[in-house]
Amino acid sequence: MKFFLDTANVEEIKQGLAWGLVDGVTTNPTLVGREGRDFEQVVKEIAGIVDGPVSAEVIGVTAPEMLEEARKLAAWAPNIVVKIPLIAEGIKAVKVLSEEGIHTNVTLCFSANQAILAAKAGAGYISPFVGRLDDIGHDGIELVEQIRQIYDNYGWGTEIIVASVRSPQTVTRAALAGADIATVPFKVMGQLFKHTLTDKGLAAFLADWEAYKKGQ
Ligand code: E4P
């Protein structure tokens, strides 16, 4: 499973890259807005430091608007993937963009049927929002399992990005479900390293080693 960082914060991305864990980045209008920087500038900077796909989202809600924005975004850097919302106009746009060779990430997916539409339109990626489903009492990973099975049934190559990740537990479940990618906030990526028994065990090893050296 690949890891994407779900952030528009360059410092977080640099830290993730230093860990050797970042295969790509996803952004959305909320994440970009949080940085208070120029959209084009921040997306170009991220695309320049990440050796992998960087998703940038369109704002338009009609197919012509999305197509115009998508072509502009895709021209900013070769690794830019255009994020398109899963609405009828979005699916229309994805079909055209896939024929033009522009990579797309279909976002805001909350059902298996929506994921079928994205794959049939030629989306490069589908982003089921697991955490937002969990928030309303569903089991978001069940949707990922359904999409995995459907895509495998038909040999569809659209990659599944588990999005809206709130906890390390979701990362484990995403991997068990056979997701291609988990896009995780920086905080969650950091939490993946953590286990109290690791910290406790390491402290004991170091203390024992000090005692051993003193006895030499
Ligand atoms: C992914 O593509 C989205 O940007 C993101 O995962 C949404 O997460 P949220 O539900 O925490 O806002």
Image (tube, rainbow, N blue to C red):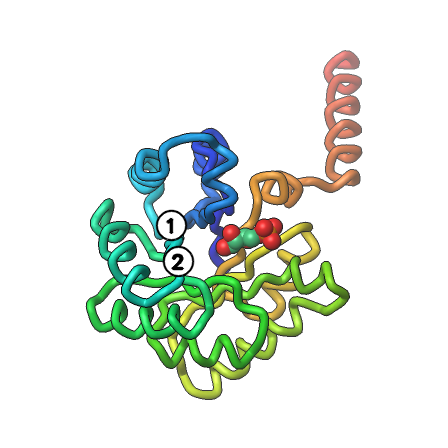
Residue 142 lies in quadrant: bottom right
Amino acid type of the residue tagged 2 in the rendering: Lys
In the figure, 53 relative to 19: above or below?
Answer: below
Judging from the image, what secondary structure is the residue with disc 2 in? Answer: strand
Give the residue drawn at x 37%, y 54%.
58
Q: CA distance from mark 2 to mark 1?
A: 6 Å
Note whether ligand 1 is within 8 Å of mark 2.
Answer: yes
Near mark 2 (Cα within 10 A), the count class, few <14, some 14-19 or many ≥20, is many
Q: Are marks 2 and 1 in contact (CB under 8 Å)?
A: yes
Q: How many marks?
A: 2
Mark number displayed over residue 83: 2
Spot the residue most to the bottom.
Answer: 153
Give the residue drawn at x 33%, y 74%.
92
**Horizontal and vertical percent for residue 4?**
47, 50
**Horizontal and vertical percent for residue 42?**
36, 35
Q: Which residue is mark 1?
A: 56
**Horizontal and vertical percent for residue 22?**
45, 45
Give the residue drawn at x 78%, y 22%.
207
Amino acid type of the residue tagged 1 in the rendering: Ala
In the figure, 106 relative to 149: above or below?
Answer: above
**Horizontal and vertical percent for residue 155?**
40, 83
